[in-house]
Amino acid sequence: MQDYEIIFRDFLKQKGLKLTFPRKAILETIFAYHRHFDIDALYEVIRTKYDNVSRATVYRTMPLLVESGLIKQSLRCQAKDNYEHIYGHRDHLHFICEKCGAILEVESEAIDNVIKHLAEENHFQLNIFNLNARGICKNCLQNREL
């Protein structure tokens, strides 16, 4: 059993809920998926493997996964909330292309240090942060020049 499954099982138990087969299928799919995703895209991936997991179950499970601290709603892109699993991953910056919706993740120790310093300076207990920058990606810039 993976650590994230143990964490989610314990979280659900505290809420008086069980790790059902559909919830486990959703969890496994998310942790096998190493990109940002919206709920509908996640459901399409799940649907190809598991025919007994409904779209409604996916929508009801997402807030539980967020509350458990295993995933986060990381950004809003092209009118959809995008999520990513964060268990075992560092905070990072997202560069979001306003033209094609591409998302580039960038880790920066310098940015981490500035944010942590600002949190300390303002007597703020920092648990997690989300930074997004919008612009035009390399591919769209190159295509615009053609």
Image: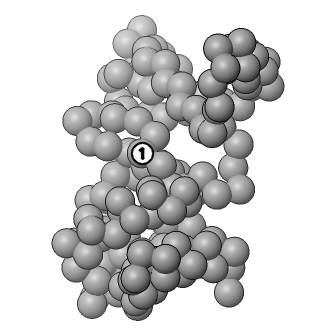
Q: Label 1: few (<14), some or many (≥20) within 10 Å?
A: some
Q: Reply above or below: 37 against 7.
A: above
Q: Reply above or below: 37 against 142.
A: below
Tell me how the rendering is colored: one colour
6 relative position to 109: left or right: left
Decide which of 77, 113 is in the foreground and name it. Answer: 113
Task: Determine the residue positioned at 64% across, 14% down.
Answer: 122
- Residue picked out by circle 1: 73
Task: Determine the residue positioned at 78% across, 21% down.
Answer: 113
SS label for mark 1: strand
Question: Dividing the image into 4 quarters, which one contains the N terminus?
Answer: bottom right
106 relative position to 138: left or right: right
**Residue 46 quadrant:** bottom left
Picture coordinates of residue 53, whole percent (x, y): 28, 83
Q: Reply above or below: 77 against 16.
A: above
146 relative position to 109: left or right: left
Task: Determine the residue positioned at 42% across, 75% down.
Answer: 15
Decide which of 127, 49 is in the foreground and name it. Answer: 127
**Residue 73 quadrant:** top left
86 relative position to 19: left or right: right
Q: Reply above or below: 30 against 119.
A: below
Q: Is residue 115 visible?
A: no
Task: Give the residue at the far top of this rendering.
Answer: 145
Q: Is residue 119 visible?
A: yes
Decide which of 126, 138 is in the foreground and name it. Answer: 126
Task: Determine the residue positioned at 23% across, 35% down.
Answer: 79
Picture coordinates of residue 98, whole percent (x, y): 35, 22
Picture coordinates of residue 78, whole percent (x, y): 27, 34
Question: Dividing the image into 4 quarters, which one contains the C terminus?
Answer: top left
